Amino acid sequence: MFATGIISTFTACASFHSAKDTIEAPLTAIPGDAMRGREIFASRDAGNCVLCHSAPGLAASGNIGPPAQGVGARLNAAQLRLRVVDITRVNPDAAMPAFHRTDGLSNVASRYRGQPVLSAQQVEDVVAWLGTLK
């Protein structure tokens, strides 16, 4: 299910707008770094995306979410950005967490309330790396 034709404002570290199934504008002025993005994807202390997703070149991987292989050929950076920021805008039933949304969440420990899982720069880094997975 896509949020087609809807323009939403998210609140997190940075303000941004989504249109259709994308967040067109990067969240930071500094371009994402694919190598840092790979580290965030694999890191237990950051994204820990490998808990649910498999990815080329990473030994640890999950099978709950779709494989990351080829995602850069299927989705552009703006589509990837929305999915990392808040997958529920594309699929409300997704098990994946909203990595850069802070409003409207439940079951968040008090010390983490109001803080995104990933910073705006980390989101851009992950998007840059996912974009290389053709």
Image (cartoon, grey):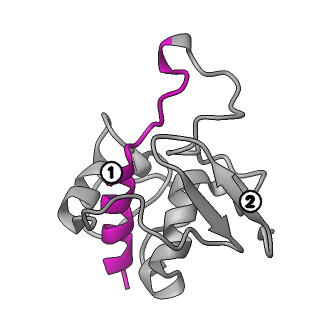
**Span shown in magenta:** 111-134
Classify mark 2: helix, strand or loop: loop
* Amino acid at pointer 2: Asn
Q: On the rendered structure, is 89 left or right of 30?
A: right
- Among the 4 quarters of the image, the one containing residue 11: top right
- Among the 4 quarters of the image, the one containing residue 72: bottom left
Give the residue at x 47% y 29%: 115
Give the residue at x 57% y 63%: 82
- Vertical relation: 56 (above or below) 16: below
Q: x, y percentage for residue 97?
A: 58, 43
Q: x, y percentage for residue 3?
A: 78, 67
- Disc 2 designates what residue? 91
Q: Would residue 23 be counted in the magenta stretch?
A: no
Q: Which numbered circle lies on residue 122?
A: 1
Give the residue at x 37% y 77%: 131
Q: x, y percentage for residue 8?
A: 72, 58
Classify mark 1: helix, strand or loop: helix
Q: Which numbered circle lies on residue 19?
A: none
Figure quadrant of the C terminus: bottom left
User: Counting other residues with Cα less than 10 Å from the Cα at mark 1, is it few (<14), some (14-19), or many (20 or more)?
Assistant: many
